[in-house]
Image (cartoon, rainbow, N blue to C red):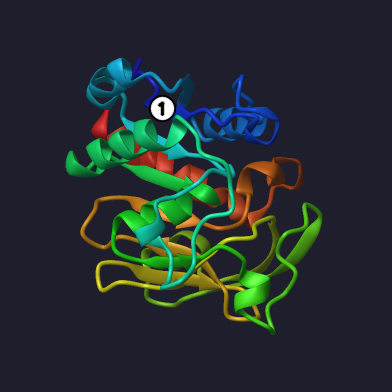
Amino acid sequence: MKRKPMIAVIMDENTSAGGNYYQTSKNYFSAVSRAGGAPFGIPYLPELVDQTIEQFDGFLSVGGRIEFPRPWYVHGDQSRYPTSDRLSVELALMGGFLARNKPVLGICNGMQMLACLNGCRMVSDVHSSWPDALNHDQADLRHEVFIQPGTRMADIFGNETFSANTFHREAIVEASTDVVVTARAPDGVIEGVEIPSQSFAMGVQWHPEKLAAEDHAGLRIFDAFVDAAHVKS
């Protein structure tokens, strides 16, 4: 029996209450398991970075609200979130998986990190920077997501337009030449990216892990991610 691909899931933390314990939704683990993967939570321990990159078949960067480096933002802007030990460990993990061409999936905060590691720029508050933007920072908000035809993400979702959940204040606003924008909200806010030079490196701004109960089309990103990790396992 072929083993399930092992997926490293970076843990989130309670940054709003001091960051003294890990706090990660079970939905991420359920979504990976449903897609056929074996998920494992990864703590913020630098000494585990190399071993994690070597032993795991894919990396899942989950949502969160942590301070990103100032150069990642457009001129004059900067993060409004608290600092976290997560940043340095996750940068090393994501960079290591990408360097080995192992699958990477970024969700929300994870999509932003993937994009900025590849030259994109962001804003700390999409609502103040983009006057016509929807109020994306609501846990129960749904809006349409338009998938860009001709992209790998379109191959996954079938060029569909579907309603997705959104919950973010920061947003990618400048894409680099190394990144393809694959999805947008009705207001034009970037909702998906991919790195064409990688076998699988994609990010979505919405939270597909929360949609399992609906058998939602957005869950297909986990199926594609785990399938790509199967190839590496």
* Res. 102 image quadrant: top left
Q: How many marks?
A: 1
- Between 187 and 21, the residue placed more toward the observer is 21
Q: Residue at x 56, y 58 (%)?
A: 205
Horizontal side, residue 41 vs residue 121: left or right: right
Q: Residue at x 24, y 44 (%)?
A: 98
- Between 75 and 115, the residue placed more toward the observer is 75
- Between 70 and 120, the residue placed more toward the observer is 70
Residue 129, placed above or below residue 17? below
Q: Amino acid at mark 1?
A: Ala
Horizontal side, residue 33 vs residue 133: left or right: left
Q: Residue at x 48, y 30 (%)?
A: 36
Mark 1 is surrounded, within 10 Å at the Cα level, by few (under 14), some (14 to 19) or many (20 or more) other residues, namely: many
> Residue 2, percent across and down?
33, 19
Residue 159 visible (yes or no): no
Which of the image's four quarters has the C terminus? Answer: top left
**Residue linked to disc 1:** 8
